[in-house]
Image (cartoon, rainbow, N blue to C red):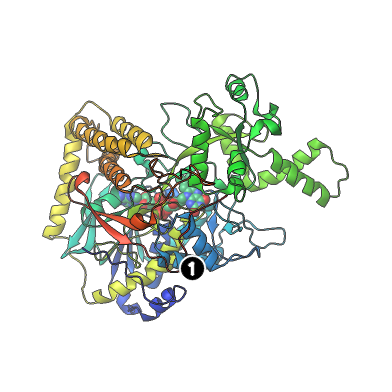
Amino acid sequence: MALDSKVPKGPIKDKWTDYKNHIDLVNPANKRHIDIIVVGTGLAGGSAAATLAELGYNVKAFAYQDSPRRAHSIAAQGGINAAKNYMGDGDSTYRLFYDTVKGGDYRSREANVYRLAEVSSNIIDQCVAQGVPFARDYGGLLDNRSFGGVLVSRTFYAKGQTGQQLLLGAYSAMNRQIARGKIEMFNRHEMLDVVKVDGKARGIIARNSITGEIERHSAHAVVIASGGYGNVYFLSTNAMGSNVTAAWKIHKKGAYFANPCYTQIHPTCIPRSGDYQSKLTLMSESLRNDGRIWVPKNMEDVMAIREGRKKPTDLSEEERDYYLERRYPAFGNLVPRDVASRAAKERCDAGYGVNATGEAVYLDFAAAFVRYGSEQAKIKGINNPSKEEVIKLGQEIIEEKYGNLFQMYEKIIAENPYETPMMIYPAVHYTMGGVWVDYNLMTTVPGLYCIGEANFSDHGANRLGASALMQGLADGYFVLPYTIGDYLSDDIRTGKIPTDTKDFDEAEKEIKDKIDFFVNNKGTKSVDYFHKKLGKVMWDKCGMSRNAKGLKEAMVEIKAIREEFWKEVSVPGGSNEMNPELEKAGRVADFLELGELFAKDALTREESCGGHFREESAEESGPQKGEAKRNDKDFAYVSAWEYKGEPADAVLHKEELEFKDIELKQRSYK
Ligand SMILES: Cc1cc2nc3c(=O)[nH]c(=O)nc-3n(C[C@H](O)[C@H](O)[C@H](O)COP(=O)(O)OP(=O)(O)OC[C@H]3O[C@@H](n4cnc5c(N)ncnc54)[C@H](O)[C@@H]3O)c2cc1C
């Protein structure tokens, strides 16, 4: 099947407006006869469900947690971008568009990204109207801060809890519709398959995770908003429950999966502490606004710190290597995430890591304490303040901005980051790859949509900080509610979709058979055993840098783990009860297939771009020596994979990317 991105014609700045002016609409009376299923109630699904219900559709919303408030979106810390130009620093829709396409290393679809930048401002107005308590400056106006990869301040934030506050906004909007009966909320329900009728998505099969009952639900369209798949690595900053199942199941039913190898490894996470860890913790990128990243210049100091003979604060400025400021003077500590992560890895691989495992660099706020403290002393009219007074005043400002993050760090590491620099190391954080969608956010299955982190989205090969929340809410509040109407306008006379049909029977049987297999297999190894094994292969061979040899090995090794899983997996408990191990087994089974496709995708893409660094494709000389080398001639496309049984047999379809409004350049942050 040829991929049609359905991008409207015309100048980029008019596309979305023209599109909205010409699509078919469903009149309010007819919306009452149309059902929509939304799988996922994080920021993407929650905003979509609330908006679709407000428009008059009947929405059935599903989440595996006990409340929409527990979606992984709640963890988002740093902020959300919008081109409001409140700081008067030259921001505009075009600049946000440009930064996002450049940040994604020119591997995203221009028209979608422009639309995202265009609606970004509406998101802030919508959320403020809902009462989201964004940070404000002294005069009461909304405040902004900077994130990596940009030269303006356009990030709106609510301390280090932006996702939580935005989710409460979306959740309140949903609750209004739940109370009106326009949203039927199915908490603790896991979607396990999509049901197609005559080629169109017409329903889902879900498991009630409290009773174990398998349920059939029908609708005129299905929206998947199930989040990202970073947990394929086992250890990541994602919520423990985040998984690929919904996205993978629709892939198996005909939705192409795009760019699975594009993963974001975030530079500022708390380093791993040992083999028994099940979760990693992010320290928001916003900290790089004020924190400076460094390792010791001299190996003797590295060893002295590791052995406890010296403290980081003992080292003078001259003894420190602020390697990001040294290598990238224009962007310094605010280079994009992929660049900052690789630079940390480079220093640690060279032996300069500062903790016992050799996998940590410092994030230091000492200079910010002095900078803010001196300013505060002036504002408060304190003449000749002592050094201690200045630092204290500066720490108060830092506490206002990032207090909860400092507290979280201290709780986990048992060190006070006001007194000693934080230790950080890159960790898996976000997946730019996902289900392929066209301009309407529809997958290759008619009537099946995918939004938020679950789709391959607008971030190309690398997402800029604070752009995921923007994209999820743009999709849910402002894009999908238009595009889905255009599709549903053909369904006003369809009537209820029955669930007592062969298509539902078959889908349900397949699910029941798999569940029976898991609870009866009585193998010798736990689900986590396989997940950890998969995660190690992923991290070692599909991690921050990749090469052909490692990727080929990864494909073979993942297949072998998968085969062992189906023989040896042990799932305690039964199927007609709450059984978290059973839920995990289904999710890990899907990760074990996705992992192999991931490696295959990475192997096929013989260029470096964004988070995908192929060792064979690095600049060999000149000022960019060692940096990623893109190959636009051969690889300026989206890889969209069609399911054909074994992941190794998946068929590649290419969506060629056209750049009419941005010149393709080497991405330099020097
Ligand atoms: C620690 C951390 C901090 C972050 N900070 C920021 C930030 O500051 N700014 C930013 O822009 N981005 C940030 N991100 C990224 C951002 O939080 C996510 O990309 C975004 O929240 C994803 O939203 P979503 O709605 O697509 O998915 P999620 O919030 O993951 O929601 C997924 C939903 O799908 C449901 N679901 C999944 N599978 C099924 C199934 N099979 N059946 C039923 N329901 C299902 C879940 O129950 C849940 O409701 C951060 C990410 C992390 C890990």
Q: Is residue 622 above or below residue 554?
A: below
Dividing the picture into quarters, in which one does residue 576 lie?
top left
Residue situated furthest front in the rendering: 621
Q: Residue 585 location in percent, x, y?
A: 26, 38
Q: How busy is the neighbourhood of tag 1: few (under 14 within 10 Å), some, or many (20 plus)?
A: many
Screen quadrant of the N terminus:
bottom left
Dividing the picture into quarters, in which one does residue 407 lie?
top right
Q: Residue 88 location in percent, x, y?
A: 66, 65
- Left/right of residue 567 with respect to residue 334 in the rendered view: left
Q: Residue 524 location in percent, x, y?
A: 22, 25
- Left/right of residue 258 with respect to residue 372 in the rendered view: left
Residue depicted at x 62% and y 54%: 145
Identify which amino acid the numbered label 1 is placed on: Val
- Residue 39 appears in view: no
Circle 1: element type:
helix
Residue depicted at x 32% and y 62%: 656
Q: Residue 74 location in percent, x, y?
A: 47, 49
Q: Is residue 348 above or below residue 100?
A: above
Q: Which residue is mark 1?
A: 119
Dividing the picture into quarters, in which one does residue 366 lie?
top right
Q: Is residue 492 above or below residue 269?
A: below
